[in-house]
Image: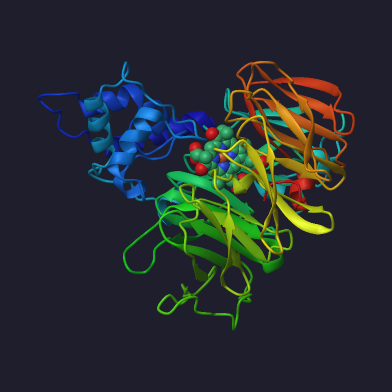
Amino acid sequence: LPAALSVAIAAVLLACAAPSPARADGPNPERLFAEHCAACHGGDRLGAIGPALLPENLGRLKPAEAERIIRHGRPATQMPGFPAETLSDEAVRVLAAYVFTPLPEVPAWGMEEIAASRVVHKDPATLPEKPRHGADPLNLFTVVEAGDHHVSIVDGDRFTVLDRFESRFALHGGAKYSPDGRFVYLASRDGWVSKYDLHSLSLVAEVRAGVNTRNVAVSSDGRFLMVGNTLPHTLVALDARDLTPIKVIPVTDGKGKSSRVSAVYSMPPRNSFVAALKDLQEVWELPWDDRPVYAGLVHSHEPGREEAVSLPGPFPVRKLKVNEFVDDFFFDQPYDQLMATSRDGKKGIVVHMDVGRQIAELDLPGMPHLGSGINFVHEGRPVMATPHFKDPVISVIDTVDWKTVKRIPMPGPGFFLRGHENTPYAWADAYMGKDRDTIPIIDTRSLEIVNTLRPAPGKLTAHVEFTRDGRYALVSVMEDEGAIVVYDAATFAEVKRLPMRKPIGKYNVWNKINFSSGTSH
Ligand code: DHE
């Protein structure tokens, strides 16, 4: 049913995308797009696995850069390069120009459309009080299988699959749980948010909160979800009970410029969501309780660049001006400070959330993937570690003086990193390198690699998550005929192998709801 609904919506959206007139000479842009781009970016250019390709949505991208990306691909994404045998120079130019051509009409996606998209599968009042399975409800894993767009719920003690259901097309990013671990929320790249009940193992409700979505966050009081979109340029607050939309917040600077959202997360100690923006040099904080956490803390950062507070009503926006466009960010463990980078920048920045401005710069070349960072204590100092998309290193940074403690050499540039309070080891990958079938394991005491696993030689292997007690580590062999491989986290011996269809991420309930220092936010 979800797939059928997706197709129906795609058909409606497609109807909005009238083709531009065919050119009499030279390559035909619509035909080229349909042949080479539509499978990932949608026949209507509104996005699917890949982002929407519309001038409104290309933000900081320049036409020459678009041509380079078409030819050479984009690192750390699923965007491949198209060599000269596939696309001539002229075809590349035509395609790049095409994506900067406005659609006659971009579909509106406001309160009305969001509310109309909502599907209620189960009346929340009919859900059981206790789990209908014998597994530890706080040691379950939600596994996203991209191969056939399914989700598996895995018992984290017996390593068996309790349920497997069809998801929306192209789920992306971490599953998010209600604070009690009872419900899981999933977001798809094309804007669908699904709520699933881990007691009855059934879908509760779904809503399409955007046309192209980055991710979803859950308030730590469990009442709200906040969805960050790249199309339209909005943040959307949902009622966590049944996914009813509460508020659509336009992401603009108030002077006519709008922005895609890079990501939104919750900051539990502050009772607020924080969102970073791709096209405005601002970080936004949106409190979910009725007491603005920042009362009296409105500082100016530079003359003429005052921090502004706008939008009365629920989710007022506190805007922090920063010196970078933020693509990727991370928090220190107390959630006082935010580290952020722009994908094309050489430096990172640190924003102190109470002070309300940038307080430090970070020396972080090589495209760090801060979203995959972890926190731990090294020689008595709080540090964070992050892989880099471009450099074969893991950087370890002191989160007090913001100095680089070490750049640990790795077999290749990586994507993800995971740790856990009950193990001294952090598990990485070499996703972006030629040894992409390896899982290097770092001892957080010596900051050296102590073991390298190769669960399925020749097959892309990445993304690790621990059981709630940190005794076992689950690793994804990310191939269509892939697997989740369970390892003993102390001896590194294989314990079990569960066949899966291109498993990407997996998320342990306990680790996520307790904001484990070794897991993602
Ligand atoms: Fe992700 C998380 C952005 C490409 C798999 N990725 C996230 C999050 C963001 C993000 C903002 C945090 C969401 C959350 O948990 O709330 N991802 C991006 C990109 O900008 C990038 C580089 C380009 C893009 O295509 O958007 C990108 N990501 C990918 C992939 O190509 C991956 C490997 C496969 C896929 O499914 O698209 C991929 N991203 C993941 C996974 C997570 C994720 C598995 C969750 C990690 C976690 O442990 O929480």
Q: Is residue 76 left or right of residue 125?
A: left
Quadrant containing ligand 1 reads top right
**How far across and how far down the image is residue 59, in percent?**
36, 50
Q: Quick check: can you spot residue 390?
A: yes
Q: Nearer the viewer, residue 438 or 331?
A: 438
**How far across and how far down the image is residue 190, in percent?**
47, 39
For residue 80, what is the image quadrant? top left
Q: Quick check: can you spot residue 224?
A: no
The image shows a total of numbered marks equal to: 0
Q: Nearer the viewer, residue 52 or 306?
A: 306
Q: Above or below — where is 195 with respect to 438?
A: below
* Residue found at x 43% / y 79%: 303
**How far across and how far down the image is residue 231, in percent?**
40, 48
Q: Is residue 165 left or right of residue 110?
A: right
What is the basis of the colouring in this image?
A: rainbow
For residue 377, what is the image quadrant? bottom right
* Residue found at x 42% / y 44%: 211
Q: Nearer the viewer, residue 396 or 169?
A: 396
**How far across and how far down the image is residue 33, in percent?**
30, 27
Q: Above or below — where is 157 with respect to 226?
A: above
Specify the farthest residue to the bottom.
Answer: 296
